[in-house]
Image (cartoon, helix red, strand yellow):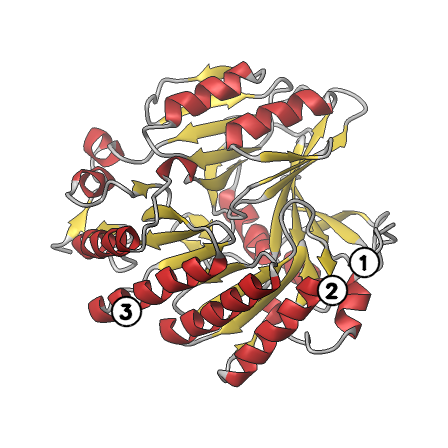
């Protein structure tokens, strides 16, 4: 296409200083003081996007709004994205909102496979991802995509890293059945019905999880999943990590209207709301990333949001909901937790958990490993960061106990291992096309 532009070209264009090219398109984070401020920016973005007939992805958070521009017809960035980015930045400046590009990132995963065609269908089924060429992507642009690369020699031992996929209680069996039909197998039934541990044909594992039936000792005032559902007015919602609802909007305007109403209700109630606006649908969540639990105030916000969606004539599609978590088996939980907090820019929650403060990446859970597993994992994490923070991120990961195990492709990516050998590629996108060619 004649207006296609490289990530480096996008960042070099006038008026894009707030933006960073990451794994998908280019993003900007504008910090807000209240959900209402975020709603105002979202509504202004709608006007700009409608005028340009070019609609971004927008994530509204309690303290900020992330806008991501991408041109799907060129599978990348275009001059249309530059033009929209300039207008969005100018609008945010008019509203007195400052950009925070250093906080931007995108997390992806890579699976080393002897036969990618054999394992890809399983991961597409268990995650609800779709195939794009030789990779898998979340159709809603929320959870990590998966790259598959050829494995040069067998690594038959169990990984120290697996995925947890939280799904609604009423689609859990269907998700398990789809994964099994796509070449998966059940590796243990010990924890059924709380979760199913499944593996692809090469032994990479995923737990399909739902909170229903867990015996939790909840603090006073917190609701169990069953109590939340029984309260009424939340038929569209499902309890995953927090409670979420997904609505099909069929266009950008209806989604913006729903999220703006919900954001103003959240501000009035003093309750955090997380909303992901896509052209064809909206995902809402209540329950903060710090703990994910739901109280009466969050229940009321969910009820108000559902009422607003019904008023707008929107249809819920709960089967589209899922949350993703990375689970590491670790001998030294504290050391591994400190490393991944630094490598991912995450916050610690207790002694075994980490979370993305923007709730845009998978959570992390650490579980005790009884004996070493020295084999290199077949799964590793990729984190796409702004080029101007990559060196600092690598340094932080090393200072937290990591070591650089590969830097031949620097500055485009450096592979850093945690104290027990689990790997992350800290990567940047701008400049790759110029250095390596369009292919």
User: Which circle, 3 or 2, is nearer the viewer?
Assistant: 2
Nearest the viewer among 347 and 330 is 347
Query: At x 77% / y 52%, what residue is drawn?
Result: 195
- Spatial CA distance of label 3 from label 2 is 35 Å
> Which residue: 44% across, 71% down?
255
Quadrant of residue 235 in the image?
Answer: bottom right
Mark 2 and mark 1 residues within 8 Å of each other at the beta carbon: yes
Where disc 2 sits, the SS reads helix
Q: Are marks 3 and 2 in contact (CB under 8 Å)?
A: no
Q: Residues within 10 Å of mark 3 (few under 14, many from 20)?
A: few
Q: Position of residue 30 (x, y in %)?
A: 37, 48
**Residue 177 can be seen in this image:** no
The residue closer to the viewer here, 35 or 436, is: 35
SS for dot 1: loop
The crowd level at tag 1 (other Cα within 10 Å; few <14, some 14-19, many 20+) is few
Please identify the residue farthest to the left as the structure is shown: 2
Q: Which mark is residue 221?
A: 1
At horizontal 48% and vertical 40% (from top left) the residue drawn is 107
Judged left or right of residue 41, residue 2 is left
- Of residues 363 and 113, which is closer to you in this image? 363
Q: Which residue is mark 2?
A: 296
Q: Nearer the viewer, residue 211 or 111?
A: 211
Q: Is residue 79 above or below residue 331?
A: below
Instruction: Calculate the distance from the C-alpha at mark 2 to the C-alpha at mark 1.
Output: 7 Å
Q: Residue 396, percent across and down?
A: 49, 20
Q: Is residue 118 visible?
A: yes
Q: Is residue 136 toward the left or the right of residue 367 in the image?
A: left
Name the residue carrying label 3.
Answer: 47
Disc nearer the start of the sequence (3/1): 3
Which of pointers 2 and 1 lies earlier in the amino acid sequence? 1
């Amino acid at each position: 296409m004649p207006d296609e532009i490289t990530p480096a070209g996008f960042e070099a264009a006038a008026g894009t200083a707030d933006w960073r090219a990451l794994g998908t398109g280019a993003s900007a984070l504008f910090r807000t003081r209240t959900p209402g401020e975020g709603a105002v920016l979202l509504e202004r973005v709608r006007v700009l996007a409608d005028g340009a007939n070019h609609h971004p992805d927008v994530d509204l958070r309690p303290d900020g709004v992330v806008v991501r521009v991408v041109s799907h017809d060129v599978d990348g960035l275009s001059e249309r994205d530059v033009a929209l980015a300039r207008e969005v930045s100018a609008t945010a400046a008019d509203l007195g909102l400052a950009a925070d590009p250093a906080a931007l990132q995108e997390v992806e995963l890579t699976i080393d496979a002897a036969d990618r065609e054999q394992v890809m269908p399983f991961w597409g089924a268990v995650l609800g991802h779709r195939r794009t060429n030789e990779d898998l992507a979340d159709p809603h642009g929320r959870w990590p995509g998966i790259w598959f690369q050829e494995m040069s020699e067998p690594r038959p031992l169990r990984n120290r890293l697996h995925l947890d996929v939280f799904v609604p209680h009423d689609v859990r069996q269907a998700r398990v059945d789809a994964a099994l039909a796509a070449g998966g197998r059940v590796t243990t039934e010990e924890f059924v019905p709380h979760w199913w541990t499944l593996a692809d044909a090469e032994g990479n594992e995923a737990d399909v999880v739902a909170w229903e039936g867990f015996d939790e000792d909840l603090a006073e005032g917190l609701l169990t999943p069953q109590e939340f559902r029984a309260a009424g007015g939340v038929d569209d919602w499902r309890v995953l990590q927090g409670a979420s609802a997904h609505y099909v909007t069929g266009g950008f305007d209806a989604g913006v209207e729903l999220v703006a109403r919900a954001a103003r209700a959240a501000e009035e109630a003093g309750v955090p709301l997380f909303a992901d606006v896509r052209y064809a649908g909206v995902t809402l969540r209540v329950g903060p990333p710090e703990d994910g639990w739901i109280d009466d105030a969050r229940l009321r916000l969910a009820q108000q949001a559902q009422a607003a969606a019904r008023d707008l004539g929107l249809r819920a599609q709960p089967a589209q909901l899922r949350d993703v978590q990375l689970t590491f088996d670790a001998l030294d939980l504290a050391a591994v937790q400190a490393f991944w907090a630094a490598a991912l820019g995450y916050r610690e929650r207790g002694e075994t958990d980490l979370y993305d403060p923007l709730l845009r990446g998978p959570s992390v859970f650490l579980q005790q490993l009884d004996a070493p597993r020295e084999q290199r994992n077949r799964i590793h994490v990729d984190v796409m960061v702004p080029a101007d923070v990559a060196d600092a991120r690598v340094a932080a990961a090393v200072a937290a106990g990591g070591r650089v195990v590969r830097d031949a492709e620097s500055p485009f990516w450096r592979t850093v291992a945690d104290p027990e050998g689990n790997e992350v590629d800290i990567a940047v996108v701008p400049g790759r096309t110029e250095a390596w060619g369009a292919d």
